[in-house]
Image (cartoon, rainbow, N blue to C red):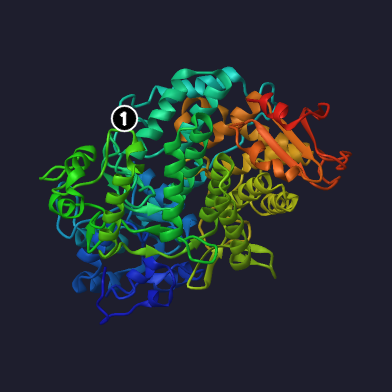
Amino acid sequence: MSANKKFTNDLSKETSPYLLQHAHNPVQWKPWSENLFATASAVDKPILLSIGYAACHWCHVMERESFEDEAVADYMNMHFINIKVDREERPDIDHIYMDALQAMTGSGGWPLNIFLLPNGQPFYGGTYFPPNAMQNRASWMDVLKGVQAAFENNREKLVEQATHLTTHLLQSNIKAQQSQAIDTIATKEEFQLIAQRLLHNADTQWGGFGAAPKFPQTFSIQVLFRNYFQNKDQASIVHAIRSVDKMIQGGIYDHVGGGFSRYSVDAMWQAPHFEKMLYDNALILGTLAEAYQLTKKPIYKEVIHATFIFLQRELFNGVGGYYAALDADSEGVEGKFYTWSYAELKAVIDPTIFDDFVAYYQVTSNGNWEHTNILWTQHELEKEWEPAWQNALKKLFDTRAVRIRPALDHKVILGWNAMLIVGFCKINAATGNALYKKAAMECMDWLEANLFQADEHYFYHSVANGRPKAHAFLDDYANLIQAYIHLQEMTGDSGYLFKAKAWMDYVLLHFIDEDGLYFYYTASYQKDVIIRKKESYDGAQPSGNALICSSLYYLGQVLDLPQWQLQAEKMIHSIRPSLLQYPGSFGFWAQSFYQMSTGTIELVGVGPTVHESLAALNAPFLPHSIRMLSQVEEDRIPLLKGKKCAENQFFICKNNSCSAPMPLVELILANI
């Protein structure tokens, strides 16, 4: 990253760590702005849009090689309007132009370097370009000169190409089926088929799905958990647990400091891409919680807590919110902070356990990865909690702590923090640890205090250095609603439920499409993008539409809003062909499909001390259930209406009918 203060561009006024990394490039970068297209049209120059993020390794490489080169910068400044975007600060822009790049080339990635007409329509792009041509990849200067020549001499063809591409982006939006008649929404047999098709792509040796690079795919693992619970399918639970075990044994899990890296570059989970993202750890926590609920393996509880401690130590802002990410690089080298030479380990580890230690973690004198060593194992992790092992890992942690640390992306992102709140609620339910409950509630309090714009009644997407940026997107609100729902189940506080409803009303007002079924990524009042995208695929994070579908179904049942429940059923009906054919790309959708196929039960408790039963009620794995407890009579919630709170009483409710009162133990045992 550049430290040359000779140059300063407009990014110096920004707060995003990624944008600030480029503030002293000789390239005259500008941030995205509402008047960008008007400015570009006035000077009749093409726009070079370069998108990345703070933890992006190849973004840093291209900066060093090209964007810090004064000759390259002079050419860029003369012929282009150069725009830098942090994909995490403006995911809406990233979605549009990444889809454009994939349509053009069949692949994508970051840095995303894409060329636009002055009106914002894309016509050419790529990812990383080297300073010199190599391996059938043009040099960056060759690309710049080729684009400039085409813009000067072949404008009509570029306009035609950009128009067709923009039309394609609009047509690729998810659409409602022509017929909305619903006969059968979802069946148990179809859900079992979804799980079986996931297992067709299972790596039965190393866990996970597919070959390298290998991502956690937590939604697919959770589908297998549900198929085991519903259909008692042994293959599902065996592979799901295999996947969890192999991940926590692998180098993708930080055995010294806790927490998980982004993904593994190999099939064995040995060598991670070392960046640590908040949302990955949030989703993995939720998956570990379910694994612990189903198996009660002590090691899962230990890894949950180690990951929680990592989050508190390295991503917590100290007052409630959590930062976005830690870089993969330090001192310009990927993974340098996390890897070890044989000699370093020998100098730190107690000689009495050294031979066992290096054998356990696959360490060699020549290194097990790029001449250095990543700690990973093929053994159960119980050994890591033995006193001698804990002492050794603590010494390594202290040794590592004095190294130059990877850079921190100190944005606090609404949707990612809401996702973490859900993860905290799940690990509290699974383990009963009150620290997780406290962290979840404090995080929500902080988000409401720092990202909510009370005067105009909306949330911001992110905040850095005290400056909020961008109106919240669909994913932000969708995760926020999920967080309120989980907080209500964790605390029994119905106030969270009514907040979930209020923000669902907001989403229905500002994000719904013309067919009244799916939801746009951007709000109707946002005007600085060329098109409004509708996302359907579940990738590294659940899609906003999948999250909204889940919440509509939940809130529709709890609050007796049949139109919301029907809309969720229509969404599943419409996505169903894709889900059945490509379940790995619709893993969160599949969880709503499961809910509809199995039917929801409502576990209700009322009474003066009923909240003392929260831990017992939340501890079991009951993914088909809604949990509702109240210490006061609450007629605004249909499940509670008419139920007197003079004494503690528990009920099982389904299809608008409740059982006779029963003891809590019987309530739980009836559903396990």
Q: Is residue 282 above or below residue 524?
A: above
Front position in the image: 116 or 132 = 132
Q: Is residue 475 visible?
A: no
Q: Residue at x 25, y 45 (%)?
A: 375
Front position in the image: 136 or 324 = 324
Front position in the image: 257 or 4 = 257
The location of residue 235, given as percent across then percent down, is 44, 19
The location of residue 52, given as percent across then percent down, is 36, 59
Assign the N terminus to one quadrant of the image: bottom left
The residue beneath circle 1 is 206
Quadrant of res 242: top left
Considering every residue shown, the one lying at the far left of the view is 366
Q: Is residue 485 above or below residue 582?
A: below
Left or right: residue 388 compared with residue 657: left
The location of residue 144, given as percent across then percent down, is 25, 62
Quadrant of res 359: top left
Assign the C terminus to one quadrant of the image: top right
Front position in the image: 615 or 671 = 615
Left or right: residue 522 compared with residue 403: right
Dot 1: element: loop
Q: Is residue 121 visible?
A: yes
The location of residue 113, given as percent across then percent down, is 33, 57
Mark count = 1
Classify 10 Å Cα crowding around label 1: few (below 14), some (14-19), many (20 and above). some
Mark 1: amino acid: Trp
